[in-house]
Image: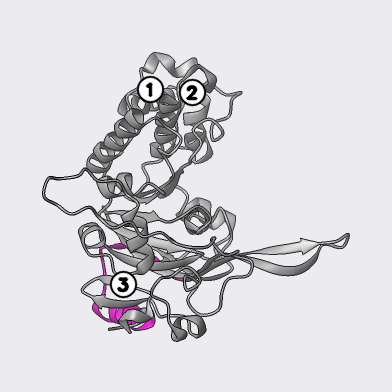
């Protein structure tokens, strides 16, 4: 078994030309301030030292309970939040401390984001033409009428009629608005898209349409996705690998098939036991694992393993020592003392 540091050394030695993005011990802590002078009295450890990589063309699903830090991880990765510590390596370049001008020049065009709320993420005072043209205007791509033609092309790519170009967001359904958000994310021909709960606000039938659209676009444009969701069924459908987060830390990371058929971490096992599955004649009913207690506060996380307060398999070492995020099987990583 190897630790994260040893894995980084091995990757550096072997060389991973297919790795698009890599996070190394990335943290995002938000200060807690109080009083008239706004004195700093603590920190919310939303993301607390996560390390993983994403290969070109793959979809990495990130799952976990609300408040586990998965959305913060995505926003920190794209530098909407400034990382507190750690390194974000994109195409071999450390982008953790680039200025806004450097980000706009070297990164913004290549990493785009689809947000959770398809209404709040669109300016209600702008038409589709203005919304989708904005990235093209900002980066000075195409000219004059060519930009409008590009907007119409993007609308058709996401399944919307080009005649809608002068309409406003309130004139569309939730699924149509999310298609608009996808078209805007595609405008700059990015290499990677971070989808932050991109289908959670939509009806189930519309979710399927959006997921299928994203898969088609991935195949057509060679996109890489980081797909953030709390819905394990959706993540299973779209992902190649799955990472499980809890209280700002990565608990488990492996190929989709491995995670769903052989989960190792007690937290992953509990999450998967809650997913409803059709009963088959002659097959025993799957045991439901009920986690006791509430999710601890990220402002005051437990010592040792952050999951030990709810873990049915916890023992003394779990309460004292933070487990390493280690490879216990081929490309199957877990942070648990049960496998030390």
Mark 3 lies on a secondary structure that is strand
Measuring 66% from the left and 67% from the top, which residue is drawn there? 43
Residue at label 2? Answer: 129
Closest to the observer, 26 or 204: 204
For residue 333, the mark is: 3
Q: Is disc 2 in contact with disc 3, using a CB cutoff of under 8 Å?
A: no
Which label's residue is closer to the chain start, 1 or 3?
1
Which label's residue is closer to the chain start, 2 or 1?
2
Q: Is residue 128 left or right of residue 277?
A: right
Instruction: Give percent across and percent down for residue 220.
Output: 23, 39
Mark 1 lies on a secondary structure that is helix
Residue 142 in view (yes/no): no
Quadrant placement of the C terminus:
bottom left
Which dot, 2 or 3, sits closer to the camera? 3
Closest to the observer, 127 or 76: 76
| Outermost residue toward the left in this view | 282
Measuring 38% from the left and 27% from the top, which residue is drawn there? 150
Instruction: Give percent across and percent down for residue 274.
Output: 35, 52
Closest to the observer, 268 or 285: 285
Q: Which residues are magenta?
A: 5-24
Residue at label 1? Answer: 152
Residue 58 in view (yes/no): yes
Q: Is residue 61 left or right of residue 111?
A: left
For residue 207, the mark is: none
Instruction: Give percent across and percent down for residue 55.
Output: 28, 60
Relative to 167, does residue 204 appear above or below in the rendering?
Answer: below
Relative to 91, does residue 233 appear above or below in the rendering?
Answer: above
- Location of residue 98 (image quadrant): bottom right
């Amino acid at each position: 078994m190897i630790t994260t540091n040893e894995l980084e050394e091995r990757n550096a030695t072997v060389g991973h030309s297919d790795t698009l993005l890599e996070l190394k011990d990335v943290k995002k802590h938000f200060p807690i301030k109080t009083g008239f002078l706004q004195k700093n009295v603590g920190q919310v450890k939303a993301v607390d030292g996560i390390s993983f990589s994403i290969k070109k063309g793959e979809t990495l699903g990130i799952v976990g309970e609300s408040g586990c830090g998965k959305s913060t991880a995505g926003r920190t990765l794209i530098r909407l939040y400034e990382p507190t510590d750690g390194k974000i390596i994109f195409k071999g370049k450390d982008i953790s401390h680039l200025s806004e001008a450097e980000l706009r020049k070297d990164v913004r065009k290549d990493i785009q984001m689809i947000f959770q709320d398809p209404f709040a993420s669109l300016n209600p005072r702008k038409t589709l033409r203005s919304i989708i043209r904005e990235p093209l205007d900002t980066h000075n791509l195409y000219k004059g009428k060519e930009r409008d033609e590009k907007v119409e092309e993007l609308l058709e790519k996401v399944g919307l009629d080009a005649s809608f170009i002068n309409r406003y967001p309130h004139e569309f359904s939730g699924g149509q608005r999310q298609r608009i958000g996808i078209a805007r994310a595609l405008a700059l021909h990015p290499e990677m898209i971070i989808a932050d709960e991109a289908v959670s606000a939509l009806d189930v039938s519309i979710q399927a349409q959006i997921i299928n659209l994203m898969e088609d676009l991935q195949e057509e444009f060679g996109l890489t996705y980081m797909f953030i969701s709390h819905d394990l069924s959706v993540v299973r459908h779209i992902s190649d690998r799955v990472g499980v987060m809890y209280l700002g830390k990565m608990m488990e990371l492996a190929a989709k098939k491995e995670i769903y058929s052989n989960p190792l971490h007690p937290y992953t096992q509990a999450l998967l036991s809650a997913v409803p599955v059709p009963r088959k004649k002659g097959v025993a009913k799957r045991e439901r694992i009920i986690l006791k207690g509430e999710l601890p506060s990220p402002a005051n996380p437990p010592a040792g393993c952050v999951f030990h307060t709810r873990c049915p398999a916890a023992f003394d070492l779990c309460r004292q020592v933070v487990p390493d995020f280690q490879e216990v099987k081929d490309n199957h990583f877990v942070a648990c003392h049960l496998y030390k």
